[in-house]
Amino acid sequence: MELSIATLLSNFTDDKLVAPKVLEKKLGCNDELSLKKLEIVLDALEKIGILVKERGKYKRIEEEDVVEAKLRCSSKGFCFAIQDAEQSEDIYIRESHLSNAWNGDRVLVRITKEGSRRRSPEGEVRLILERANPSVLARVKSSETGFSAVPLDDRLLFELNLQANGENLEKAIDHLVHVEVLRYPIAQHPPMGKVARVLGSDAEAADEKEIVCCKHDLRRVFPAEVLKAADGLPKKLGKTSGRMDLRQLFTVTFSSETAAEDNQPAIVENALTLEKTPTGAWQVGIHTTDVAHYIQPDTPLDREAKRRGTAAYLGDTCLPLLPEALTRLCSLVPGQDRLAISILLTLDDIGQVVEFEIQPTTIQVDAGLTYQQLQSMLEAKSTQEAEASHPDLAPATVEMLKQIVNLSVSARVQRLQRGAFELRLPEPVSPFPDEGRLGALTVSVANGDSIASSPLSRALLKELFILANQAVSSHLLALSLPGIYCLQKAPHPDELEDLLKLASHLQLNWQLEQEDEVRPSDFQRFIQICAESDAAEVLNYLLKSALKPFGYGKAPGPHFGLSYANGYTHCISPMQRYADLLVQRVLATMFEKGRDRRSTKAKDSVNLRHSSSHGQINWNVLPPNLAEDLESQLASVIPLLNEREKIAMDAEADFIGLKKAEMVKERTGEVFQGMITGVQSYGFFVEIEDLLVEGLVHVSSLKDDWYEFRSRHACLVGRKNRIAYRLGDRVEVQVKSVDYYRQQIDLVTVGGGSEANNEDMETEE
């Protein structure tokens, strides 16, 4: 059993008493050792006043001036506790008050001194809720007392004593190793670890995927009990009573040709159907594999999926949410009956949803196409040419696929008219069928300058999947069902200040519609303005970095990237995101236990599975106790989901950063054209346009003059030579050095900059 205090305490909500038996089940304590561990932890929490015991049950004690936070430390020893609540003050923690907590740990902090206008509040760590570093990347060193490991992350201000475990530590001296933490520091006793693996003589000699997995503690294998549980699932569907049978509909799936390059099973979790309704409208069926049917709450499969939170993608390698046996069982493959949750959208000719219904179904896929095959069909100059390129598909099927794409185009027009935007980036398409982790749609421009240069079919089909997500969100809201909503806040205008200055220096006429608010339409307009600029890729790249990461919440809110004002959820990737699996469970509860009338005596009922029920319900759809328990369960897991999404996002960015650092290091000494994208007192940042990587020209490398920083004009100005380096200036830079592990690129200027004007030369007060 893996037990953190945070996981344990998440089961205590609303001042309720919780029995140990309930905790044993929820935490998967099914052997003598894990039961003993739980008993010890409960006793300890009771003794230090976190829990109180009443009639054999436990209850959380709420303490004043105690907050939950995450530690953020610097290499110089300064530590702050960052609270989850927005606009909450950071709390300064002295090193003597850390209670052996490390950077990244989740902690309970007692506030010991209130903050003032100039000083942050101070506090002390009351309890370590969850360790962020079960393992570390480190270098081995020797001393008179033995071997120790020095973490590469200079925010981890400690060394670990190494325990002999069969590795030849003498040969590992000065090598990069992955160290598992065996014991965290206790009182005056230092932490202890063991070398799990020698990765190489240094970071550059190690495999990037190994570095990233070790750094972010990403599992590459599943525990034995999880694999056993997956292998033990029934391979046949059994009874499908209570489900709508849609096996008679022609059903098609789409996947990438590169889905199985790393010998992992393809994740095909969505299928599409299309029917003409009696009124002449089109009903598009988005059918998502019913993973929730196979993964029951509080089972080994469920706990492992919860722990992972989301699939992560490191290049062509997927670190999956689910084990292979379950992925094969749930993937939608041609000729196999599958259980699904189907969202049937009725669309008008301009791509608006007229009505929808959500049903548990049984489906069978008739054809599995790649996005490239669909693309070639769309690019055919005639129907005859399209049919000839895919002779295995009937003419009616070709027409159906074209109509699906036409509806997707209409949905895209509706989204853009709503104010949403799409970034144009030379990056791989998101592996998720919707907007994915970025929170906004992207269009690849690697081979051109328009949407047609990306896999058009894939980009457009995302429009339908986003509509399906939004339909489920609106249904949860209309029926007052518990839910998990996908939220993305707008950037603050101050966060776009440099980008606005850069646009001005490039003579791009871009201003915010409202000075005190950033709207999605501001981004849309900027992208349109940049389209004609020769720096469009760089500007889109900078705009992407201005986006706030999306997060999950229990209440609906705005989603900036898609320009939804109040309510959007993820539900169509249950094989890749645990949040989607939980939403499937909510829908399954509604299917099974939802009440379609006010009382058993009432004659009139509503169809809980149809959008016609919206506005017609004035009773509790779910029994109050059931709804309350379900809402409590979802609320308790949301912080973990957000944490796992952030870890996956950081890991994916780290992997891309390492690959870029490796590429640039091989070109050390070469000269490139670049654009200045940021100016600080210590130097300026340059985006190398050919490589889309950023490096720093440190002010100390500017030997020709003494340069002063002008914050008002965002530039560095030479006192004598009147050369200015300002936002938007083009410069020639040479790659001086690259710190591979930290992904830091040092540049020196070879030419460029601009002439300073009189205002630039004025000294700022």
Image: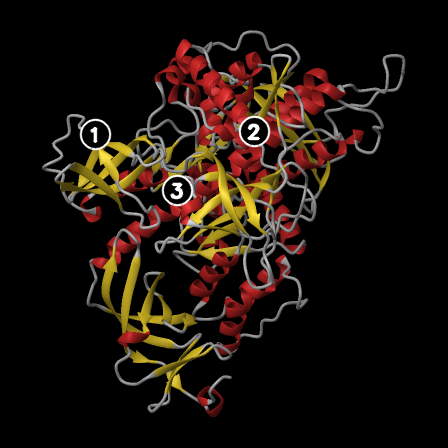
What is the three-letter code of the residue carrying label 1? Gln
Percent position of residue 500, x then y: 54, 70
The answer to which of 60 and 610 lies nearer the viewer is 60
Report the Cα–Cα distance between label 2 and label 3: 21 Å
Checking the image for residue 447, the label placed there is none
Where is mark 3, residue-wise?
A: 102
Q: Which label lies toward us, 1 or 2?
A: 2
Where is mark 1, residue-wise?
A: 163
What's the residue at 38%, 22% (across, down)? 324
Colour approach in the figure: secondary structure
Marks 1/2 in contact by CB < 8 Å: the verdict is: no
Indicate the secondary structure of the residue bearing disc 2.
loop
The disc, 1 or 3, on the residue closer to the chain's N-terminal end is 3
Density class for disc 2 (Cα within 10 Å; few <14, some 14-19, many ≥20) is some
What is the three-letter code of the residue carrying label 2? Ile
The disc, 1 or 2, on the residue closer to the chain's N-terminal end is 2
Left or right side of 556 for 261: left
Above-or-below relation of 605 to 462: above
Q: Residue furthest top?
A: 238
What's the residue at 48%, 30% (across, down)? 393
Indicate the secondary structure of the residue bearing disc 1.
loop
Density class for disc 3 (Cα within 10 Å; few <14, some 14-19, many ≥20) is many
Q: Does the image show residue 376?
A: no
Q: Quadrant of residue 265?
A: top left
Q: Which label lies toward us, 2 or 3?
A: 2
Density class for disc 1 (Cα within 10 Å; few <14, some 14-19, many ≥20) is some
Q: Does the image show residue 665?
A: yes
Checking the image for residue 50, the label placed there is 2
Left or right side of 231 for 175: left
Percent position of residue 464, x then y: 60, 40
